[in-house]
Structure formats: C-alpha cells, structure tokens
Image (cartoon, rainbow, N blue to C red):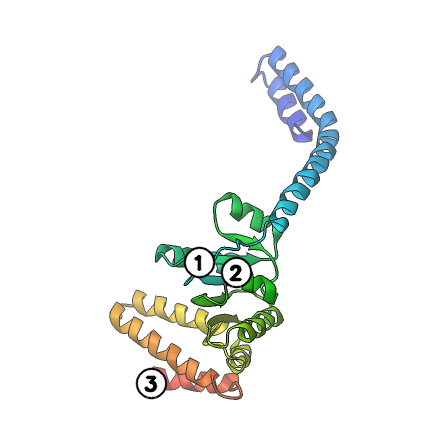
Amino acid sequence: GGEFAFVLVGSALAAGLVPDDLGQAALVVTTATMVMIPGLAALARRLGRRIDRTTLGRARAEPPPAERQPGRVIVAGYGRVGQLVAEMLARHKVPYIALDMDAARVADQRRLGNPVYFGDSANADLLRRCGIDTARALVVTLDQPRAVEAVVAAARTERPDLTIVARARDARHATALYEMGVDDAVPETIEASLQLSEAVLVDVGVPMGLVIASIHERRDEFRAILRRKEAPPAAAFQARRTVGKTS
C-alpha cells in the first residue's frame, strides 16, 4: 500500500463502508508494506543484478554451433525488424541463424528456442562459424548505418557471391550500400511510403491485384534509381511520384 491507501481506507471507515476491524487491519497492512518496500526493492535490485550477470554471461559464452547447415540465412540483428524477418523465414521453412549484440535479448530468445547468438555480425570469424561459406543469404537489419556497412564489408570479403539484403536509413544510404555490393537495400523512408500507398489504395477501392503490381513496379523503379552512382535529391523522387499520379 501507499499514501493513497490511507486516504481511501480512512474515508471508507468514516463513511461506514467497511467494518472497523477490517479497516484497521487494512491500515496495519498498508503501514507494514510501506515500511518494507525500500528494503525489498534494494534486495530485488541485488538479486536482479546477480541473475542478469548469470543470464548474460551464459548468452555471451554460448557460441554459434560449429556444425554446418547449408542453405540457411544469416540474420544480422535481432531487434523488431530482425525478429519479423526471422518469423517470415520460419513460416516459409527457410532455416536461419541470427546474431545480436544485446545479450539480454539473446538470452530471452534462446529461452524461447530461437537460434539467436550473441556476437558482432561484422566479425569475420563469427560469420565463418555461422556458416557464411554455405549460407543462402545474409539479411542485415541493424538500425545504425555504420554498423550495417561494417557487416556488409565483412560479409563481402568472405563471400563475394553471397546474396545480401540490407536495411538502409534513407535513399542516400541505400545507394552507398549498393556501391558496396548489396543485392537489395531497403530504405526505411521509401518502404514506409510504399506500404502507406498500398494501404490507402486498397482502402479507397482499387483492386488488390493492381495495387500490388503497381507497388512492385514502383519499388523496382526506386531500386534502379538507387543503384546509380549518386542518390538523387528528394525533389527527383517527388517529381517521379507526381508523374506516377498523373499517369
């Protein structure tokens, strides 16, 4: 209990809503718990730190399995985006292995039975242990541009022919990733715009098949633009959208 409990129970006693013995017992419990809370909180913090050290240490100490599983996808980063990618891979029965630098997240996912391991995806030795030489593809879902580029560079050094799909901050970052040799760079801003366009077109009654076809067409147009040496300014993208609307 807390201060509000004193007010609530006191008012209930004054109004005759609860018996006196019950009200007095509630006040005693409230007082006792208020006195105990600081000590229990301090004890909980110490226990929590001890549990965290054990759990995180276990997550860090457990390396990816040494056995090879040809044809699986390596997912670099297991935040919200990486988890969704992994979920879709699992739904289509495509094997994967994931890496993440958040030891607590790794420990949680390991408890759920997911093949997630602690480590830096830009570490070449770790990529080799994950089987990059036989991997089907690499998906980089990290949200820091420099971290994405470091993983792409390490992976390309190990496997020039590996299919790499990377998350990009924006159009310019996507262009830089294409120059580094990724097969597909997915800019957050453009992809969000395409998804919003798809939703509104369907909601206003445009047939789903036409919407999906046009979204794929527009995505291909953006991909072709981003593969050029320099990312076009925002005005160029706006101009192309305007042309698309008029056509």
Badge 2 amino acid? Cys
Secondary element type, mark 1: loop
Badge 1 amino acid? Gln
Q: Are marks 1 and 3 in contact (CB under 8 Å)?
A: no
In the image, is 172 to the left or to the right of 92?
right
Q: Quadrant of the N terminus?
A: top right
Secondary element type, mark 2: loop
Q: Are marks 1 and 2 in contact (CB under 8 Å)?
A: no
Q: Toward the viewer: 157 or 165? A: 157
Q: Residues within 10 Å of mark 3 (few under 14, many from 20)?
A: few
* Label 2 sits on residue: 130
Badge 3 amino acid? Thr
How far apart, in angstroms, are the residues tagged by discs 1 and 3?
50 Å
Task: Write down the quadrant of residue 14 in the picture.
Answer: top right
Q: Toward the viewer: 155 or 202? A: 155
* Label 1 sits on residue: 69
- Residue at 52%, 47% in the rendered image: 110
- Residue at 48%, 49% in the rendered image: 114
